[in-house]
Amino acid sequence: MSRSSKPIRKAVFPVAGLGTRFLPATKAMPKEMLTVVDRPVIQHVVDEARAAGIEHFIFVTGRNKGVIEDHFDSQFELEHTLSERGKKNELTNLLNDLPGAGQTSFTRQQAPLGLGHAVWCARDIVGDEPFALLLPDMLHHAETPCLADMMAAYQTHGGNLIAVAPVPDDQTHQYGIVGVDDTKAKVSAISKMVEKPARGTAPSNLHITGRYILQPEIFTLLANQTRGAGGEIQLTDSMIQLMDSKTQPFHAVRFDGNIYDCGSKIGFLTANVAYALARDGLGNELRAELGKLL
């Protein structure tokens, strides 16, 4: 089996950001632990990865992020109390969310040097195999999880895959944008990749949504990557280098669900409403209450 077609077992979650847009809520609580309905944002993203078959969850953390590690650990006192009180459903749900022994790893990004640097920090844990990368701020809401779609595409195409979705043409300058051979296809070869193109110069309206499957060669490029936009080590710059080397294919996988940027207040609030409306036993009541407000 070639390395570019090895199964995807590991996923990286960059969770070192400060969350300054949510102060003072994030003064003592990581932004990834803010809840969408009754689950932390990071739990929703880990759920997506688990549903796609990921076996090992790698968190790139920063200072004051220890509560994320605690969240994915067993808590004997709570579990014992739930058991003693006969709260079987709550205990079962809690245990079902718990990764197995040895399935989580945590490493520290010691300086805010950008997404590319955060990914590079996971290099020794990922090792010499392909991996998934999921940005926790971006919740992908659909019947079929985004990463599961990408895994299916990987079985056919191998190489590197990037989830994309359309945005209005007048907003392309705000995103990483890819040009593809067929803008309507579910999976299409990437012909160009640009980080925040100048207005009117974007190769398409398909933006990078925060889900990736990458080959381990990206780590070598990130190790030598000079700082780009914002003085940070940009993942897109290294992906462009790898794509331009013509040694591996890059494909875009179109995501057709809804995406909520939980790094913004409006995106976070909208995600709460959307996920609650989709929840059995909660949606109808919330819909009625929203009707009163609106």
Image (tube, rainbow, N blue to C red):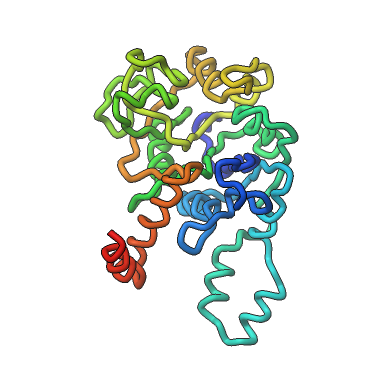
Establish if 121 lies above or below 15. above
Q: Is residue 12 visible?
A: no
Q: Examine the image and state in which quarter residue 185 appears.
A: top left
Question: Does 67 sit left or right of 247 as displayed?
Answer: right
The residue positioned 73% from the left and 40% from the top of the image is 108
Q: Examine the image and state in which quarter residue 9 appears.
A: top right
Question: Does 10 sit left or right of 267 as displayed?
Answer: right
Of 181 and 247, which appears nearest the observer? Answer: 181
Q: Is residue 172 visible?
A: yes
Q: What number of labels is visible?
A: 0
Q: Position of residue 132 (x, y in %)?
A: 53, 39
Q: Position of residue 250 (x, y in %)?
A: 43, 24
Q: Position of residue 64 (x, y in %)?
A: 72, 48
Question: Does 16 sit left or right of 285 as displayed?
Answer: right
Residue with the most extreme bottom position: 85
Indicate the quadrant containing the C terminus: top left, top right, bottom left or bottom right. bottom left
Q: Examine the image and state in which quarter residue 291 appears.
A: bottom left
Establish if 282 lies above or below 134. below
Q: Position of residue 174 (x, y in %)?
A: 42, 26
Residue with the most extreme left position: 184
The residue positioned 60% from the left and 34% from the top of the image is 129
Establish if 67 lies above or below 238. below
The residue positioned 27% from the left and 23% from the top of the image is 182
The residue positioned 35% from the left and 13% from the top of the image is 201
